[in-house]
Every structure is written in C-alpha cells, then in structure tokens.
Image (cartoon, rainbow, N blue to C red):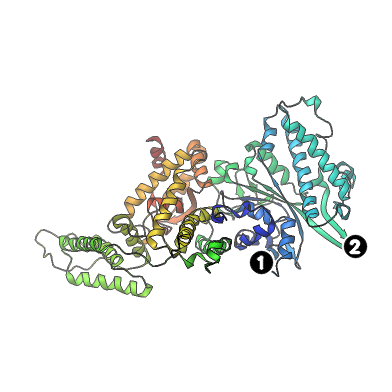
Amino acid sequence: MANPFEKRASEYRRDDEAFLPLVTPDPLITFFKKHADDGKLYDQLSVIIGAPGSGKTTIARLYQYATLKTLLQHESQTNFKPLVDTLTQCGAIKNREPVLLGGRVPLESEYRDFWEFPYPEDLKCKLMFALIQSRTVLSWISNLVSTGVALEQISIIPRGDAIAALAAIGGKDGISLFNKARAIEEQIYRISAALLPPSIDDIDDEAAAAYHPFDVIERFEIRIGEQKTVLRPLVIFDDAHSLHPEQFTAFRQWLARRELKISRWVLTRMDALSPADVLLAQGESNTKRPGLKNARELTVIWMQSQDDRFSKRKAFRKMAKGMATRYLRQMDVFSRRGIQDLTDFISTRPDTIAPSRLEALASSVDSIQQKNGISDARRKSLEELVADYLSSTGLEGEDVALAMLSILFHRYLKRIPQKGLFDHQDQDVEPNRPIKVDGGIADGAKVRLLHDFGRPYYYDIDALCDASSENAEQFLHLASTLVTQAETQLIREKPASLSSRVQNRLLREKAGQIYREWDFPHSQQVAVLAEGIAQQCVAKTLEGNASLGGGAGAGAFGIPQEEFDEIPKKYEELARILKFGAAYNAFVLVQNHSTKNRMWCQIELSGVLRVHFGLSQTRGGFLERTTDDLLSMLKSN
C-alpha cells in the first residue's frame, strides 16, 4: 500500500474502521478536557483555531455520532479503550454509549459564493444560514440512519418556548424533519448554483423564509422498541476559514446566541481571524480579544497554545510516537518483519566526525589555548568539568568534548581581565564568575559541529517530534521521508536501520523542501523574514562563547511586548505577514516572555525552519530586536 505517513488521519475516509486505528486521544486531553470539565465545551459556541495539520478535521470526524458508535462496537476487539476513556472524560460518551449526536458540516467555497451575490447583506445571511441549518439537520439524521436507526424512530424534543415554530422546520418526527431539510437545501442550492444570480423577486419566498431548526431543537430522541435514547445535538463546522471575513464574523455572531440549546463548534485556521486576533492573542486565559469578543459568549481553543510549552512538547512527543506506531502497523513490509515502532529502525547513536576532521578540531582548540595564554592547569580543570558532565549524562564523543572545551575557553577569556603586554602569559587567572557546564553548552557544541564538520544533529525520535512544532501533519511529512527510506532498504533485502547521518540528511532535505514549497498568502515575505531571522540567529549561535540560550543559541527575534502590540495598528502589512507566518507553521509567537525585567514577544522560528537552517531545537534563546528591524528586512528585498 502507499506510505500512510504521506496522508493525514482525516483522509482515511473509506470507513471508520480504517480511520479509528490512526487516532490518538492525547489532543483531546490537551485541548478539550479542561473546557469539558468547566461545562463550556458543549454549552456555548466553541471556536477551535489551529494551523493546517493540527488535527482539527480529525477531531471533527471523530466526534460524529456514526464514528463514536463504530468506536464502541469495536472497543473489545481492538486497543480503543484509551480513546473511549478519553472521550468519556470529555463528555462525549457515557456508560459506553454516545450522548452527543455529532454531525460535521464542511464550509466549502460554495458558502462564500453567497457573499458575491448582488443582494442585501440581510438576505445573503438568511440564505446562507438556512442552507447551513438544512445540511446540519441532514447530517444529524444521516449519522443516525448509517447506524441502523430508521427515520420513523427519530424525533426531536423542541425547546419549551419554540413549539409554535415547529411547523416551519417540518414538525417533530424524523420523516417530516428530513423532508423539510431536503426541500430547503434543494431550493437554496438552485440559487447558489445558478450561472447568474436570480433577481430578488424571483427567489422562492420559502427559501428565504424563517427556517430556524437551531432555534427549535433541544434534543433528539431515538425510540427502538421500548428503548428510548436522548441525544444532545452537536454541529461541527469545519474549514470556516473558507468564508469571507465579513461573512465569518456574521456567522460567528449568529452562532454565539445564548438561547441556542444545540452544541456548536467552529473549526478554523488563523486565516479567518484578523491580524490583531492572531498577533495579540494571549493564550486561553485571555478573555478579551479583538473580534473574538469575550468568554461569556464563546470558548476559544487554540490548538497551538503558548501555555506550559514544556509540557505541551512532552505531550506531543507521546502523541506523535503513538500516531507513528498506528501508521506503521498499516504497512505490511514492516509488520512482516516485526517492526512496529519508528524507534525499531531510527538509530539513537550519533555518528562522530571523521578522524581527519577530529584532528583539525583538536588543533583549533590547541590554537585557542596557545594564542590566549591559557594555562595547562586551567585547561585540565575545564576538561574535568566537561568529562564529569558527559559521564553523568551518558553522552559520548571526543568531538563533542572538544567543541564544549572550545566554548569554555571563550567563556573563560570573557571572564578574566585582558592581559597586558608585559604580563606573564602562563599566569593562571581566576574568572570573575564560575564556569559551569550544562545541557545548553553541550547542545551548542553539537550545533557548531553540525555547521563546521557536518556532524549529525537531527536524529532520533525526539528530534523528529521537536522538528514538527507540535503539528501532527508536519510530523507525518517529516517522518514519511525516514519511513520511505527504511521501506526501500527492506525491499532491497537490507536492514531497515537508519544511521544518525542518514536521518540528519533526510530530515534537512525534507525541511528544505517544505520551506521552498511554501504557497500561502504572503509566503514570499514570510520567507524573507524567516531567512533574515535565521541568518542572524545562526551567526549569534556560532559565536565562540555561545552566549545565548544557555549555550544552545538563538532561534527567535524578541520584540518588546509594548512595541509588538502596536504592530496591528501602525503596520498593517507587517501584521498580515506575521499573521500568515504564524498561521502556516513558519513562526510561533510567544507572548509576554519576561527577560531582563522587560516583557517580550518572541517571533520564534518553527521546528522545520530550525532544521533547515541548522539551529538548536532548544527554545528560549532570542535576539533583542525592534519592529524597525523587521521592517528593514522586508524593505531590503
């Protein structure tokens, strides 16, 4: 079969049996459980925002009623218990039965066509809302019918104050409800599909009339024999970024009404948001956002949250490894050989540099010592610090030890007074601050070995996960190149194992390909900023004393927060560029980062860009810059 890593889970649409084994429960715990616990996930409008590939459509499909029923039917036959337990915690399942009647409605470009009609805005909204509601009702009923429920067994429980409006939606029983929804859909579809929009006078009164099932329906009731099941309807609007911006605003305001009893989710990319919404978002705790109103009206779920980024990275690693295992099991060439996990063929042992290059590295370190008059005793003490650290962490490699020693030499020289012409050159001077060795220095040493000697840096499963910037689709794209190589080796009757050197080469090639194939709004300007930031970060990272990020180097620009907050008002073009950079996995905007008694917004390069340009995946190190620096980079190209 084709390499499943080249697809997303949501693309496995043959049937739910093929889709469900690829779904991992971790994103539900990370992004949904908290909102389910506080009672907002199903009681008010939830706007779920994520970059392409963050898993929005996978979640939308999972929450459909038919998918939940399939999951529960196969729970005992497969390893679905963790997913069932998680959905139970998130309030979608109770006592091993769905409590939600979920239906997914994709908002394709067809809906945006309404905004191009030469009609008053009020009429355009009425037509769109009527079509959306009719298709939602059809989706709910279709989900029920696909699980074996007959139309005759379906009815609705209307809101107590909406009895009079029942006739407008067809009545309470499933047959009438279905027929009315189908008729409304056909009437409005004829309008949207016309080569020339009909005049207002020619529009069927019924199509533009008050068809408002969302205002009427409170619950669905299923009667099979003596058994009665009551379900809460959930509509999941996917790809809402396809709507016109003004249309999206009207759509969101319409759904945010408190009197609606149905659960409603809107899934969108950041494209649909204004630059201010994206650039000034303060994470989930912020209750007021321009354009997004406040938490009393809706719940906003950012699927790339800034909160507790260490834990989010750790959680994503777990999720990605589980996802990779699920995908790998779909490939016969691996399962026949008992290979069930990426770690079965991804080496964690680094390939060190060649002896001739090691000799050149040692010579350069000796030269630093001799040129700057560093005593043998001082060198020995620094070598002992390095040896103790490497021994305690299990790291290996004479090349890493020498590169770390080079950094310590430069740090030592920065911390002692400059020697005069007549000073004893072999005199040992104590530094004004103690010199310590930690993971940052080790990481910085490995980064410079990558640049100076081609030593592999991007290898093993954690490096693969971190390069994905907590984005599932990005992870699959990067993993696919490793899986394809291992598959080729197996087909040629060779071991599947990939050395660190091969992994490093393949991942950097793939990252470069992803970068070069960017094709989204303002992608050229985003690339200009990305390259400018990366070049300056590389230069700073490779400085002798590795001063930033604890030694690991820089991977971001830091703009003073108060200055960054003014960008949407003062620099509209720059705001749009940063918005699309964040929306398409080029940048991560880390707001309100405190350093040196000042708040900063970090414009952090994504994992893919760090791999392409050769930067550490360790977060935190940034270069202090201003808005003018960003504008200058754009003007020079």
Residue 516 horizontal side relative to residue 535, left or right: right
The residue sitting at 47% across, 58% down in the picture is 488
Residue type at the position of mark 1: Phe
| Disc 2: which residue | 225
Callout 2 environment at 10 Å: few (<14), some (14 to 19), or many (20+)?
Answer: few
| Disc 1: which residue | 80
Q: Can residue 284 be spotted in the picture?
A: yes
The residue sitting at 82% across, 54% down in the picture is 219
Name the one closer to the observer, 15 or 589.
15
Q: In which quarter of the image is the N terminus?
A: bottom right
Q: Can residue 457 be spotted in the picture?
A: no
For residue 361, above or below residue 201: below
Q: Quadrant of the C terminus?
A: top left
Residue 419 horizontal side relative to residue 502, left or right: left
Tag 2 and tag 1, C-beta contact below 8 Å: no
Q: In which quarter of the image is residue 371?
A: bottom left
The residue sitting at 49% across, 50% down in the picture is 589
For residue 14, above or below residue 577: below
Mark closer to the chain start, 2 or 1: 1
Residue 605 placement (x, y as % from top left): 44, 50
Residue 213 placement (x, y as % from top left): 81, 45
Say what secondary structure mark 1 lies in.
Answer: loop
Residue 130 horizontal side relative to residue 242, left or right: right
Callout 1 environment at 10 Å: few (<14), some (14 to 19), or many (20+)?
Answer: some
Q: Residue 358 carries which label?
A: none
Say what secondary structure mark 2 lies in.
Answer: loop
Residue 334 placement (x, y as % from top left): 53, 64
Residue 559 placement (x, y as % from top left): 43, 47
Name the outermost residue toward the left.
Answer: 422
Residue type at the position of mark 2: Gly
Q: In which quarter of the image is residue 524?
A: top left
